[in-house]
Amino acid sequence: MNSIRRDQIMELSALYYREQRPEHSFRPGVDMITASGKVFDEQELVSLMNASLDYCLSEGDQAARFERQLAMTVGVRYSLLLNSGTSANLLALSALTSPYLGARALHPGDEIITTSNKFPSTVIPILQHGLIPVFVDVALPTYSMETELLDQAVTAKTKAIMVAHTLGNPFDIAYVKEFADRHRLWLIEDAGDALGSMYQGQPAGSFGDLATVSFFPGQQITMGEGGAVLTSSSLLKQIVESLRDLGKASPHAYKNAGAGIRETPGRGYTEGNALSPAGFHLHAADLQAGIGLTQLRKLAEFTRKRREHYMFLYHALEPLQYALYLPEETPGSEPSWLGFPLTVKEHSPIGRNELIQSLEEHRIGTRLLFPGPSISQLDYRADSYRLAGPLTNTDTVRNRSFWIGLHPGLTEEMLSYSAGVIHKLFTM
């Protein structure tokens, strides 16, 4: 029997993909224009098949390669691959509770400045650790933290700022970082929506003490499930790594015991197997990392298309600014937009819900703009949160904002159809 070579399997996999997913022309009003979506081709399938032939079903060489490449892409020293962006937020915040941080470690009752205008995974870890989220309003139409309110938010109990780059649009990082440094606060960038975004020529995710990214379908790149924690601190890297690995101290830590995690003495313990009560098992698999490596090579092209699609929709919808707030980039930033947010103005002839319903009927997908947990959901304990002033714009986002797609899987014809339908709805 003739042996089958690995390269033949790859060639057949690519052929299978092309035969099973033939391209067809866009059919307006028939084909769904999704608000978000994974963009892939035969290269990802080949990468998946290649990784599967090694039959490494857990974390392995592909994961290590992905971590190194991701760190280089974002411009940080370390990245740690995890099973989701939600887990990344959990471990990033959990790391700041470590006793190895001394007086700067977070304790229950400490305050974390954030916004509620975000997917709940930013706020949930704060509550899980008995910390107090201090909610700051957002600015329109950037949808980013209103930095002028930070002075009202900080108190003697404030220990950190954990805030997201909404839909890929960076918050005012220079202001927030200077504020955090001045008050000696930790800064966690939730860059789950912002891989590929730039601020003052530097990648989003490279400014904070810690940053998190997500690889869920619909993000800038995907591996199905997945996320990562980013940092340039060797100590924070060791702590996150330990938390990810069931509380084990990494072997590297024992060579740097003065700066990191010390081995727990005791008969029967070997280096790397000393467990702590605080630990999780949140690894991603090599199969996912193989897909991620291929996606990461496409990130620059994905980002270019996202920015082009943003500009196309912005110019196409400019005449409707009497009724809609169009999204604006934070000064100094170049966002890799996750979606195109729209906020219906108060005097608009069409309300948000009516507009969304009509768009969906025309096969144009929409999403609400990550309103996060409402204050009413947190009222189960009066001292579980604090407001740094009224959340006027946050309430506006909750009640009148949504977003449509601009991801790289869309074409100019699809974007033109979306804009045309919106114009038609406002002129009927």
Image: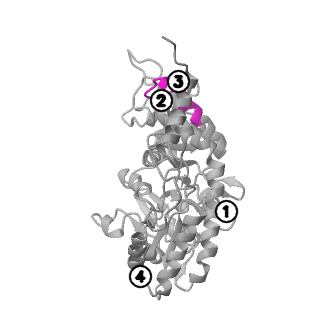
Is residue 157 at least partly visible in the picture? no
Q: Which residue ends up furthest to the left in the rendered image?
A: 380
Under tag 2, what secondary structure?
loop
Q: Which residue appears farthest toward the top when viewing the image?
A: 1
Task: Decide: few, some or many residues near mark 3? Use Cα within 10 Å; few <14, some 14-19, many ≥20.
Answer: some
Residue on which the image places disc 4: 351
- The answer to whether the residue labelled 2 contacts the one labelled 1, judged by CB atoms less than 8 Å apart, is no
**N-terminal-most mark, 4 or 1:** 1
Residue 25 to residue 50: above or below: below
Hey, which quadrant is residue 64 in on the image? top right
**Residue interval drawn in magenta:** 53-67
Which one is earlier in the sequence, the residue at label 3 or at label 1?
3
Q: Residue at x 54, y 27 (%)?
A: 61
> Which mark sits nearer the N-terminus, 2 or 1?
2
* Left or right: where 70 falls relative to 118: right
Magenta-span inclusion, residue 60? yes
Tell me the residue that label 3 is attached to: 251
Disc 2: which residue: 59
* Residue 32 drawn above or below residue 242: below
Residue at point 48%, 37% (across, down): 288
Q: Residue at x 43, y 49 (%)?
A: 86
